[in-house]
Image (cartoon, rainbow, N blue to C red):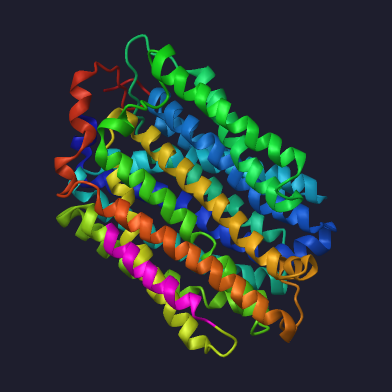
Amino acid sequence: MILKVAGLEYKWKALSVTSVGSLMSAIDSTVVLLALVPIAEDLHADYVTIVWIVVAYLLANTSLVLTFGRVGDTYGRKKIYNAGFVVFTIGSLLSALSQSGLELVAFRALQGIGSAMMLSNSLAIISEAFPVNERGRALGINSIVWSSGTVLGIILGGLIITYTTWRWIFLINVPIGIFGTAWAYATLRETKFRRVGENFDVPAAVLFTLGILALQLGFTLGLLRGWSDVYTLLSFAAAPPLLAAFAFWELYKVRDPIVDLRMFKYNRMFTASIFTATVQSLAMFAVNFLLLFYLEGIFGLPVLTASYLIIPMAAVNMIAGPIGGRLTDKYGPRPIATAGLVIQGAALFLLAMMNARTPLWWVAMVEGIYGLGGGLFWPSNTTAVISSAPRERYGVASGTLTTFRNTGMILSFAVSLTSVTAALPAYYVYQLFVGTLSGHLPSSLMVSYLNAQAFAYHVSLGLLAIAAVLSALRPSGTLARHSGMKEVAAHPMVRTSDDNGRS
């Protein structure tokens, strides 16, 4: 096996390649939020367009990530990952050149497609390069990169917004993307698992993509147009039959499914870990959105200054991630991931108690606690998902995890903004979201906002309790006992390890 011959050298090179992609994505996701004010002013974009600039990326990413994971498993993870670098870089360049809000929305969607190609295969590449008893460590290191990207995004975003044009928030991705593409092409070895006579299931890919897109579009339109809007209702109505048709097709009509749905029934580790991640994302994604609104509306902080208070979360996450990964390798994911969720629950409880007199140092401390929980949860739960899947389906496992997590994120985003909209006039919601509020909210609205925020955090706390229960119900023991790699022996594969056909 060529990967074994390469030993330690190759696995660290592979991790360095995926880290470049993670760093680029993390920086991009942070700086875009900080640049909404100059984007709205320069492109004369309204509130709806600004929301779409944020959401279009997630919609494209979520609806396609499972498909690209399956394509990578079948035709080559290196090919799809490298193509993702190229697409993301082109999308970044076009975003920087956008002349209207609608153009920027379209090019943000293109970025999301590139991100889906990378994200669905990056975890598979790491899992292929590292043995099962070292994957927690590898993903813990990967979490350092994500947290570093968050901090860098805040710092770079502040410098770009202050001294240059918003277009540089996208242009900085271009040299990173070019380097990442070249480094990935030179470093990664091709890995693909394709049974003799196996074909890619196009009808299933179309049904799943349309079903997930309709579901998430329903949430987005509900947020923007109202939950009784005809287009919102049509989107929600279209999602169930499309996803049901996908499930029926996968179970009964095709020999080579995109995802073997029976794995949800027979693989407890995989199922528990997927649904734990989904509920955790639903509970936690909107936390920092609401925190920024709180700091802007109650304390009157500019959005950039408010963003600095997110840095303690990222800094603690950088420290806790590798520790959580190593502990997962030693003790298994159940105790580590569950402990992370409990710690995040404690942070949510403290956030729900915030009022107009809460000191900023206390907010920073709670963000640190939040980062500690996330640092323990993410590498342990992600390692559990990938390692419990068959080796030839790492890309599908990664895509499934991302699809469920992102769906939870979009729903969390919609619920949090809906709760704020119910408490504040639309004019103030727009100012909070974009970051143009001058001073703090009028005192008459502060109480309404704080009550809405506390309600949203208590809902999130309840969801997080459900996630903790799901996490505790997963099988115990180290992941070597639950590795899906044993299943590969039962399936004859044609495998190539590089572009020259060597195996």
Residue 439 visible in the displayed image: no
Residue 145 image offset from top left, x and y in percent: 41, 59
Work out whether residue 356 or residue 84 is closer to the camera in this orientation and state it. Answer: 356
**Within the magenta stretch, is there residue 261?**
no
**The C terminus: image quadrant:** top left
**Within the magenta stretch, is there residue 353?**
yes
For image coordinates 75% across by 83% down, the residue present is 442
Seen in the image, is 459 located left or right of residue 472? Answer: right
For image coordinates 53% across by 43% down, the residue present is 115
Work out whether residue 300 or residue 426 is closer to the camera in this orientation and state it. Answer: 426
Q: How many marks?
A: 0
Residue 295 visible in the displayed image: yes
Work out whether residue 377 or residue 466 is closer to the camera in this orientation and state it. Answer: 466
Seen in the image, is 472 located left or right of residue 371? Answer: left
In the displayed image of the protein, which residue is found farthest to the top? Answer: 197
Residue 275 to residue 208: above or below: below
Q: Residue 124: which quarter of the image?
A: top left
Seen in the image, is 108 located left or right of residue 345? Answer: right
Seen in the image, is 389 located left or right of residue 54? Answer: left
Residue 403 image offset from top left, x and y in percent: 48, 41
For image coordinates 19% across by 19% down, the residue present is 490
Residue 295 image offset from top left, x and y in percent: 61, 79
Work out whether residue 455 or residue 247 is closer to the camera in this orientation and state it. Answer: 455
**The N terminus: image quadrant:** top left
| Residue stretch in magenta | 337-354
